Image: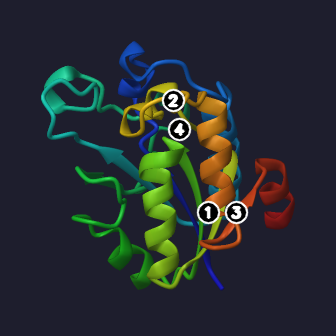
């Protein structure tokens, strides 16, 4: 067993008001704690950032929000994989990078829970990786609530969206664990 940390879309553009209110304002700090421990222990770290193809997205290259936040910025030879889909694995060399290093187990964290985190965790599991999701190192936004698909459906809060997604992922596509529990397991 060899574990690696995959940080997904912790980018400056995620602070845009376009996304709406979010839950878990401490997600980046929790991700930084995981990153620090993995670096100390010499575990592989991979960074993934989104390059949207929608010109109005805060994550489109012309909008200036693609930089990884300083709190979890890559150091040394930590690779950065660029994607334009919700999966960290589609259109990137992430899987090959992990497999050539003998990685079998992943720790995932980042933004946003119901989109790129969910898709990447599901795909990581389907590719045969054992995935731990640091649920408190992720966050959702209230604009993810799509109440227009069924008339009268109340909009969900960012916390409700986050909790619902984590509940669907846990046990089916890996384990949802608190950062403190992951840090204890790595000790």
Q: Which residue is mark 4?
A: 72
Crowdedness of circle 3 by 10 Å Cα count: few (<14), some, many (20+)?
few
Above or below, 68 relative to 4: above
Q: How is the image coloured?
A: rainbow
Q: Which residue is most to the front?
A: 151
Q: Position of residue 166 (x, y in %)?
A: 65, 53
Q: Which residue is mark 3?
A: 41
Residue 110 located left or right of residue 49? right
* Contact (Cβ within 8 Å) of mark 4 with mark 2: no
Element carrying mark 3:
helix
- How far separated are the C-alphas under marks 1 and 4? 24 Å
Above or below, 35 relative to 88: above
Which of the two discs, 3 and 4, labels the residue nearer the N terminus?
3
Q: Nearer the viewer, mark 2 or mark 3?
A: 2
Q: Which mark is residue 169?
A: 1
Among the 4 quarters of the image, the one containing residue 43: bottom right
Which of the two discs, 4 and 2, labels the residue nearer the N terminus?
4
Q: Position of residue 25 (x, y in %)?
A: 64, 24
- How far separated are the C-alphas under marks 2 and 1? 18 Å
Which of the two discs, 3 and 1, labels the residue nearer the N terminus?
3
Taking the spot 44% from the left edge, 27% from the top edge, the residue there is 143
Q: Which residue is mark 2?
A: 141
Crowdedness of circle 1 by 10 Å Cα count: few (<14), some, many (20+)?
many
Which of the two discs, 2 and 1, labels the residue nearer the N terminus?
2
Of residues 63 and 44, the one nearer the viewer is 63
Element carrying mark 4:
helix
Above or below, 137 relative to 176: above
* Contact (Cβ within 8 Å) of mark 3 with mark 1: no
């Amino acid at each position: 067993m060899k574990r690696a940390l995959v940080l997904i879309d912790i980018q400056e553009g995620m602070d845009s008001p376009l996304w709406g209110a979010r839950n878990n304002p401490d997600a980046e700090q929790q991700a930084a704690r995981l990153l620090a421990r993995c670096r100390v222990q010499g575990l592989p770290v991979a960074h993934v950032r989104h390059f949207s193809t929608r010109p109005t997205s805060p994550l489109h290259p012309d909008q200036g929000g693609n930089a990884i936040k300083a709190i979890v910025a890559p150091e040394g030879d930590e690779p950065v994989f660029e994607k334009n889909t919700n999966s960290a694995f589609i259109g990137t060399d992430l899987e090959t990078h992990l497999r050539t290093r003998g990685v079998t187990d992943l720790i995932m964290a980042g933004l946003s829970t119901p989109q790129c985190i969910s898709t990447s965790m599901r795909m990581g599991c389907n590719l045969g990786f054992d995935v731990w999701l640091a649920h408190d190192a992720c966050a959702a936004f209230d604009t993810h609530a799509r109440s227009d698909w069924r008339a009268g459906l109340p909009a969900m809060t960012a916390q409700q969206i986050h909790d619902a997604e984590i509940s669907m992922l846990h046990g089916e596509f890996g384990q949802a664990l608190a950062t403190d529990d992951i840090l204890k397991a790595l000790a």
